[in-house]
Amino acid sequence: MTTTYSTTGTVSSPLDLSQLRGEHTSINLTGGSGKGKKEVKPNVKVTLTSLTVHNSGTLRKINSVIIPIVYSDKFYKDVLDPTLDDVNKLIYYADIPVGAICCRFENLAKGAKEPPTLVILTLAILAPYRSLSLGSSLLLASLKAALHPTTPPPPIPSDNKANTRASLTVAPPRAKVNRALAHVQVGNDEAKRFYEKLGFKESGIAKDYYSKVEPRDAILMVCEDIASVLGEKTEPNGSS
Amino acid sequence: MAQIPKHRQLPDKENKLFRELLTQYELKQYKKGIKAADTILKKFPNHGETLALKALTLHSSLPDPLTITAVPKKEEAETMARLAIKKDITSHITWHVLGILAKARKDWDEASRAFAMARKQDPDNIPLIRDSIALLTHTRQYAPALAARHHYLLLRPQIRSSWLALMIAHQLNGDPEEALEIYNGYRTILKNDGATAPEKSQVLLHVIRLCIEAGQEQEGLEKLRQGIRDGVISPRGEVTQLKAQILTSLGRQSEALETYRELLDQNADNLEYYRGYLKSDGIDLTVSLDEESRAKVLETLSKFSETFPRSAAPRRLALDFAQSDKFRELARAYIVRGLERGVPSLFVDVKGVYTDATKMTAVGEIVEEIVSKLQKDSTLNDADSISPPTVLLWAYYYLALHLSHPFNPNPNHTRALELLNIALEHTPTLPELYMAKAKVLKRAGDPLGAAHEMEKARLLDGQDRFLNGKAAKYWLRAGNVQKAEELVVMFTKKDLSPVQDLTDLQCLWFLQEEGDAYRRNNNLAMALKRYQTVVKVFQEYEDDQYDFHTYCMRRMTFSSYISLMRYEDQLRSHPGYFKGAVAAIEVYLKVHDDPSLTEEKLTPEEEAERKKAAKKAQKAEQKAKKAAAATGDKKDDPLVPDEDPNGLNLLKSETPVDDALKIWKPLERLASKRVEVWTTGYEIFIRKKLYLAALRCLNEASSLSPSHPEVHRQIIHFHSQISSPSASLPENVTSVISSTLETILPKSSSPAVVNKSFLESNAQSPSHIFAAGQSALVINPEDIKGAVEIFTKLAEENVPSNVELMEKTLESLTAKGAEESVVSQLREKFVKRVELAWVLRDKQEQDKRKVELEKEAAGEQLAV
């Protein structure tokens, strides 16, 4: 008599966890395939992780080695806002944090002159990990999240302050955002090409945008219709 | 029924109260119980049993851990229990209570005596027998425990656990055959077994183990097969292991092989299964193999790695047996696979083969080749693809750890640091790189720089407790106790001091490292306190087993119980105890040699600060007391404070050598295979002037490891001690000593000659050079020049550099009264040899570096 055993969940046949959603999200690298790029062998796991107080040291490290601007403590506090949880992400390549995106929403209030916009504040990938489609995947993930808002995670109760009911209420989901904006320093052609490839268009120049680095002007790169970039059906304006 | 003696009789009303008192105690209604006892005692103040029960109730009502207000109550209970005995010496209750209180104090001797007395008064009292059995087993008096078990069975033959417990009692008493007899006899009279399914399987598994122990493997196998057929035990896991074990020892090769195959199907990552498989196949891996069987092992393992492609175990095991070119091929494949998967522990895994120097060199060459190939082609495969950038990163990491490993005959710390800096430029977000840098710096002799690197790793992820603990450890190594405690507090309980919480959690590494840090900072009192806490933790481990003597019998988890008992019997052979104990002994001996160390030397400023702090504490205490009195709140009752918060009482012991001996005793029995036990023992006995005992230690040590450097020094030391006139030994002792000593120290040659030849035959080992230098100082304390000449060899090119020994050398020379210029000359030579070793530099330079590092760290934080 031979008995057969199920080995699910052991080393010889591990559970497939990629379907699970949670703090860590697996992503498939998209775009940029073909066209002279060499295939990466063996395949590597890539995941996105939410920003938290604890990994903000990692975020600071990434930004400080790539971006010549020194951001304030306030910046790092603001990006942890629970309503931004689905657009602000760290990207892990083979379980090593190698890049991050930080965004902010503008004109969300009703009656604003401009349409609601996702403003990309920082987007950074460590040098050895560029040209692996990590940046575009990260940006597309944020764009998608902006277009399809989900309920933000509940706020974490504070240890040292009294927790009121207001401070613990889960914020309502955002409105849909179908426009994105990024600033590119004049002369940074590499970045400009990157955004253009993803459907962003140059729409003007912001004078003296940078206060401490030269050149001080920034090109405004705008994507008017996130849905079409993502390859989804464009919805008529006004419906949300 | 026997007549109740007059002094114990109570009128009906009080008798009823007495019964209520018993139930109230059982139901834990202590307040009510005490009230009832008081009512009886008002009328009959001399009623011993009531007094005893009141003492017991009072004792049980106290909080644990004790608070300040509870201390006098505890004393009251103890005296009351003693008084009760005086009032009624023939009552089993009074003796039983005395035993329970003694047991709570962990005073096993007194408890044993009290229980014995109580059983004399009432031999058939069930709870009493049960308590007594637990105590006897705990104190390892197996024969009386067995007798008590037997008696218990006669009283309660209808209970299942009485039979099974008797079986265990026989087994503990060293008689597995009788234990099996009991079990089989019990099975024959059993009509229907009311045990639950888990109980049945637990019992059967244990009985099978018992069969193996009694050498009745065949019967065990039958029981096992019957159990599987009856569905009592599951055919997987533990049972399969037992089956494989039995079949192997029965020599039924083909079945054993098949069973190991089955086990490997269940878990292909267990190295033991592969070893068992090969052993059944006729290859014993514990002895060195010949060419033919080695080829067979490799072939078998390669087949397994094809069958279990995801398992690393067969591939890793093969590295232990492959040689030369085959090794290169297998090792490269193994390392590349690990690098591609980004396995952080790859180095720790592979370094097991480094005991073989040629393999170590081969691995180094393989990784160098991988790094250069990746730098050139950025791929390890065909030209059309690229390897993930992380492969190069992990390769840098591996190579850095490899280059700085102590097994390396000439560790290249500078190159390791360069590689890690390149890797950090590549990916600055990987904590492992900072950790590796810290480790390299630590090995190079720069604990402060190492701590700063580890801190950088910690700052990357504040949520990582491992990094937090590592950083704390490195700060302790650098001597910064305060900073370390600031870090660990992030993960300890909020309302306790971190040290207290980690003590409660029995966190051995922290206690040990903090003790070491205090010792390096010359705060011997605190060091000793931490080491004693380690020793105490092991006492707690031992005491904790008490409850299991009854619990496991009830739950029928016999196998685990027996393995617990065997574990407890050799508890103190644990490396954690060993380390703490040896360190504590060294401190005690240091204090014995120089009693002035027990006096605190404080600068006036420190003294003023101490006074200020004491005043502040006093004020705070008074305030707290007042507040407590005002509110009358019971919850504010503070715990009993530590009587010796700074360890000064420990340090000021009148008998440091005896204290040391007490800690050493268990090591003698349980860790007798370690040389350090005997060398430490020698240091204790020579100070107690017990020359024969000291000689015995030398004998044991030199038979374990004849050329051990420390043993060599001690033999020379011993020789000089007994030849000095102050020894003045009796005739017969001298003759014994000289005849024994001859076997380890040839009489014909003088110690100086022996020392010289010792040095010559071990000219490239730093620890032997160090010992030879120390011995030279023992032979002739005046000849510092000669000793320095020997010590200088530590700085030679072809001798592996050892920072720790260099540090010790400088210290001991200063202690022996060498001139400062001599020491600083030697220091310069050492520093030139190991330039990264900041610990060797003089104080000024170290301070300067400290300031620089702090500045850098502060700058980094701002920039980040």
Image (cartoon, grey):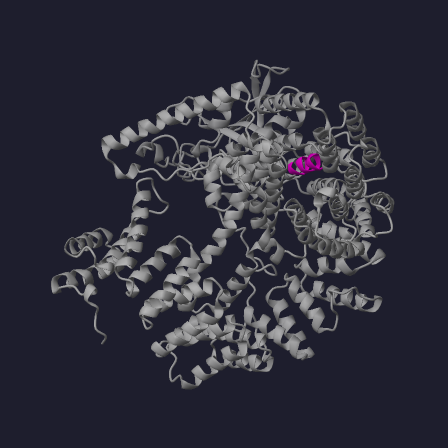
Image quadrant occupied by the C terminus of chain B? top right
Seen in the image, is B570 located left or right of residue B807?
left
Q: Quadrant of residue B235?
A: bottom right
Foreground pick, A28 / A16: A16
Q: Is residue B465 magenta?
A: no
Q: Is residue B178 above or below residue B541?
A: below
- Where residue A180 sits: x, y (%)? 51, 29
- Where residue A14 sits: x, y (%)? 57, 57
Q: Which residues are magenta?
A: B435-443
Residue A36 in view in this figure? no
Foreground pick, A206 / B253: B253
Seen in the image, is A67 located left or right of residue B536?
right
- Where residue B101 sits: x, y (%)? 35, 55
Report the residue at 40% width, 39% height from top.
A151
Q: Quadrant of residue A134?
A: top right
Seen in the image, is B638 located left or right of residue B369?
left
- Where residue B593 sits: x, y (%)? 64, 37
Q: Is residue B717 above or below residue B632?
A: below
Foreground pick, A41 / A237: A41
Report the residue at 78% width, 32% height from top.
B834
Q: Is residue B439 magenta?
A: yes
Residue A45 in view in this figure? yes
Q: Main secondary structure of the magenta part?
A: helix
Image quadrant occupied by the N terminus of chain B? bottom left
Seen in the image, is A11 located left or right of residue A36?
left
User: How many marks overall?
Assistant: 0
